[in-house]
Amino acid sequence: MKGTPLVERRGKGVLGVGMFERALKIFSRGRSSAARIPMMALEECELIAMGPSDIHHLGSFAKSTIKKGEFIRFMRGDVIDFKDVLRRIKKGKITPDDPLQIDKDLFIDLDPPSLAINHSCNPNAGIRARNELIAICDIHAGEEVTFDYSTTVSCHVKPDAWTMQCRCNSENCRTSICNVRSVPKDLLVEYLKMNVLQSYIIDELSEYLKN
């Protein structure tokens, strides 16, 4: 990475811009769609509120007890393709750590409440389908809601193209956040059993998890 321009999101993640652009070749294979997908227009009770976080600056916290398996919220925002991700980064509208990948070439430019949800290597929530945040254990009022960022990053995104420093301080902290294959296999199997892997990630890992 020496000599490569870096983009940082509040000290959390580091990405070589040149590497990020080269990664576009990975996502541009096959069909690319910038079309908006329906984001479930159902009214939902906001179970979380933003506040200061010990993990990193701003986090999202449970307003009351959230039971295991309970739906928390949809991770919302503009649905864009990878080219639009690059355009928004270059314009300074987002940083490389901000978008949530939901398919091979689709991302969500997250709204503030979704963006404030921090990573943990020992999370209490996870994302299923494309953008549904679900509790994987009971979350008590005032507890920060977290999910494992790596579970949403395609295995085609190489560590030399994108990585993020982990500050979750959990006992099983992996120290850095990389793609989904950086998650221990036994933990991935547990995430699968708990139904907190996105559909496109399950497709990517289908052969890997069989062995």
Image (spheres, helix red, strand yellow):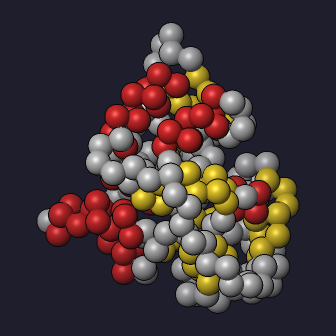
x, y (%) of residue 95? 65, 38
Left or right? Give the position of 193 relative to 121: left
* Residue 72 seen from this side: no
Q: At x 33% / y 68%, what residue is drawn?
A: 202
Reply above or below: 74 against 45: above
Q: Residue at x 29, y 43 (%)?
A: 29
Where 29 falls versus 23 (above or below)?
A: below
**With respect to residue 194, does 84 lie above or below?**
above
Is residue 65 left or right of 14 when viewed as pictured? right
Which of the pair 172/203 is nearer the observer? 203
- Where is residue 98? Give x, y as percent: 63, 47
Q: Quadrant of residue 134?
A: bottom right
The image shows residue 112 at horizontal and vertical percentages of 76, 57
Q: Is 29 or 172 nearer to us in this picture?
A: 29
Q: Going by the picture, which residue comes out furthest to the right?
A: 51
Q: Is residue 53 left or right of residue 78?
A: right
Left or right, residue 131 beside residue 197: right
